[in-house]
Structures are given as C-alpha cells and as structure tokens.
Image (cartoon, rainbow, N blue to C red):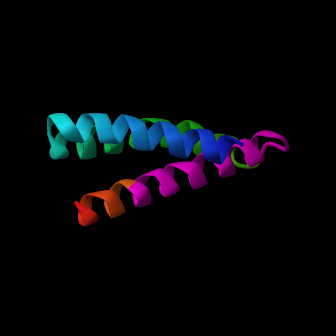
Amino acid sequence: MVALLSAVAVYSFGAALAEVHPLLAVAVNLVAAGGAAPTVWRWRFAPVTRWVVGGGAAGVLLGWATLLLGAVAA
C-alpha cells in the first residue's frame, strides 16, 4: 500500500512539474529524495517502519521509472 501511494504521488507530482519544465521535475525529485534519505536510513532497522520504508523506496523507484518511460514514449 505504501509503495502504491508513493508511486502515484511521485508520478503525479513529477508529471505536473514536467509540464512546467522537465529539469524542474528532476531537480525537485532529487532534492526531495536527498532530503528524506538521512531519516529513512536511520529507520531502516526499526521492526515496523522498515516495511514502510521499503514500500516507500519501492514506490519512489516505480514512480521515477514510470516518469522516465512516459518521457521516452512522448
């Protein structure tokens, strides 16, 4: 569920930003991922949150892949 929600959020936000400027979408995604990375790294071994972290990471990667495939197809 977390992966699905993360993927939809990353894709929709990235697609909206890409309509303004593609480099803006890339920059905002990298800043957001870089900002969240230290906190996620600390949570990776907590018993319950590691599943949430894993789902979020998988969702972000899936959202980025979908954005890239959409950019290549267009």
* Quadrant into which the C terminus falls: bottom left
Q: Position of residue 58 (x, y in %)?
A: 59, 55
Quadrant assignment, res 56: top right
Report the side of 4 relative to 66 (left or right). Answer: right
Q: Is 40 located above or below residue 54 in the figure?
A: above
Q: Main secondary structure of the magenta part?
A: helix
- Name which residue lies at 27% across and 65% down: 73
> Where is 14 relative to 57, above or below?
above
**Residue 26 falls left or right of residue 63:** left
Q: Residue furthest front?
A: 74
Question: Which residue appears at 62% of the width and 45% of the height?
Answer: 4
Percent x, y of residue 12: 41, 38
Q: Which residues are magenta?
A: 46-66
Q: Residue 46 location in percent, x, y?
A: 79, 42
Q: Residue at x 85, y 44 (%)?
A: 47
Question: In this view of the protein, can residue 32 be seen by the observer?
Answer: no
Q: Position of residue 16 (x, y in %)?
A: 29, 34
Q: Is 68 above or below relative to 35?
A: below
